[in-house]
Image: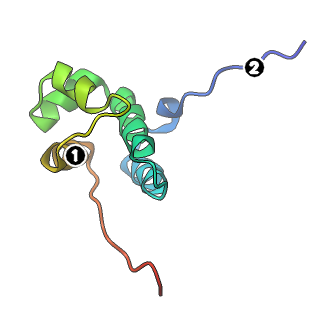
């Protein structure tokens, strides 16, 4: 019998470059829940309580904003990304 360990992306999100690449890949999916799940993974890697504090949010508000199906406000997303040390940029679809 082969034993496998469960994969947890949060175990690998330990620097801003990796976090930025992970979130960029999530933004390419048309389903907004994929991006929220990616931000949740990063939040767990950094520590939910610390991220909430750095973003100026309550911990419960952070959990609520990152729940699947949530529709967080744009300013909340920006606060979270800033606290994570990353930003969103736009690039042309057709080059």
Say which quarter of the image contains residue 92. bottom left
User: Which numbered circle lies on residue 77?
Assistant: 1
Q: Choose between 60 and 71: the one closer to the eye.
A: 71
- Residue 68 position in % (x across, y down): 38, 31
Q: Which SS class for mark 2?
A: loop
- Residue 84 position in % (x across, y down): 27, 43
What count of labels does the image hold?
2
Q: Choose between 32 and 42: the one closer to the eye.
A: 32
Say which quarter of the image contains residue 6. top right
Left or right side of 85 for 5: right
Left or right side of 51 for 5: right
Residue at the farthest bottom position: 95
- The crowd level at tag 2 (other Cα within 10 Å; few <14, some 14-19, many 20+) is few
- Residue 27 position in % (x across, y down): 42, 55
Q: Residue at x 12, y 24 (%)?
A: 58
Residue at the farthest top position: 1
Per the image, the residue denoted by label 2 is 4
Q: Are marks 2 and 1 in contact (CB under 8 Å)?
A: no
Relative vertical location of residue 17 with respect to residue 38 in this rendering, above or below: below
Distance in Å between CA atoms under marks 2 and 1: 34 Å
Say which quarter of the image contains residue 64. top left
- Residue 61 position in % (x across, y down): 17, 25
Relative vertical location of residue 41 with respect to residue 18 in this rendering, above or below: above
Quarter in which the N terminus is drawn: top right
Could you tell which of marks 2 and 1 lies nearer the N-terminus?
2
Relative vertical location of residue 47 with respect to residue 88 in this rendering, above or below: above
Q: Residue at x 45, y 39 (%)?
A: 13
């Amino acid at each position: 019998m082969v034993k496998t360990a469960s994969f947890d992306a949060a175990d690998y999100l330990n620097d801003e470059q990796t976090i930025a690449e992970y979130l960029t890949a999530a933004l390419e999916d048309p389903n907004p829940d994929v991006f929220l799940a990616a931000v949740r993974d990063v939040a767990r890697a950094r520590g939910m309580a610390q991220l909430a504090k750095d973003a100026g949010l309550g911990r419960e508000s952070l959990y609520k904003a990152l729940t699947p199906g949530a529709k967080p406000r744009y300013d909340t997303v920006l606060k979270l990304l800033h606290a994570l040390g990353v930003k969103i940029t736009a690039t042309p679809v057709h080059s």
